[in-house]
Image (spheres, grey):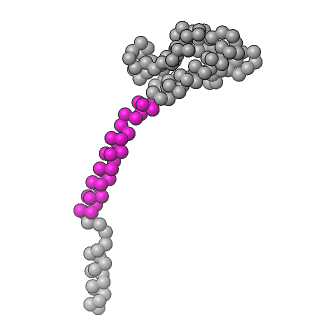
Amino acid sequence: MRDERRKSSCSNSSAGFTLVEILLVMVIIGVLASVVVVNFAGKGTEARINATRSSIAAICTAIDVYEIEVGRYPSNLQDLTVGVDGKPPYLRGGVPTDSWGNAFSIENPGANYLVKSPGPDGQLGSEDDITSFTN
């Protein structure tokens, strides 16, 4: 009977985690989480800018193909959403928007066109505008 008491009292005292062990694990998880947050902070804006630059590059390619096939540059970006001479549209699904939902614009339609995004603030003519390079 003594052996049975020892077994039951020993197994109960060593089961589970102590409060110190649980706190230590929580601190370690907290430190790791803070390192991850610091490393990824600000990357969302950078990713949106890069995505907008990719969209501008696609629009510029569509403008160049339009010019080669039609013989002139489009007067606005809406011209790229309509096929010419039975060909599919140069931009499918309409004119894309930038990563913030703003419409792109085109300046100087012609050989030296400039495609612009208003950028994060949504207003053209500010410092954060994202533009294409002129041809």
Q: Residue at x 55, y 10 (%)?
A: 112
Is 29 magenta? The answer is yes
The foreground one among 14 and 112 is: 112
Left or right of 68 in this view: 111: left
- Observer able to see residue 109: yes
Tell me what residue is drawn at x 23 percent, y 62 percent.
20
**Eyeballing the image, is 47 above or below 107?**
below
- Given residues 88 and 135, the one toward you in this image is 135
Tell me what residue is drawn at x 31 percent, y 78 percent.
11
Query: Which quarter of the rendered picture does the C terminus lie within?
Result: top right
Our reading of the magenta stretch's main secondary structure is helix
Q: Quadrant of residue 26?
A: bottom left
Foreground of the two, 18 or 2:
18
Q: Tell me the magenta residue range.
A: 20-48
Specify whether residue 116 is painted magenta. no
Q: Quadrant of residue 48?
A: top left
Which is nearer the eye, 10 or 29?
Answer: 29
Q: Is residue 57 above or below residue 42?
A: above
Q: Quadrant of the N terminus?
A: bottom left
In the visual, does 41 lie left or right of 27? Answer: right
Task: Tell which residue pokes out farthest to the left in this image.
Answer: 20
Q: Position of residue 3 (x, y in %)?
A: 29, 89
Q: Could you tell me how many numbered marks the image carries?
A: 0
Outermost bottom residue: 1
Q: Residue at x 27, y 63 (%)?
A: 21
Is residue 103 among the parts visible in the rendering?
no
**Residue 118, x across and y down, in percent:** 45, 18
- Give residue 108's position: percent from left, percent from top: 54, 8
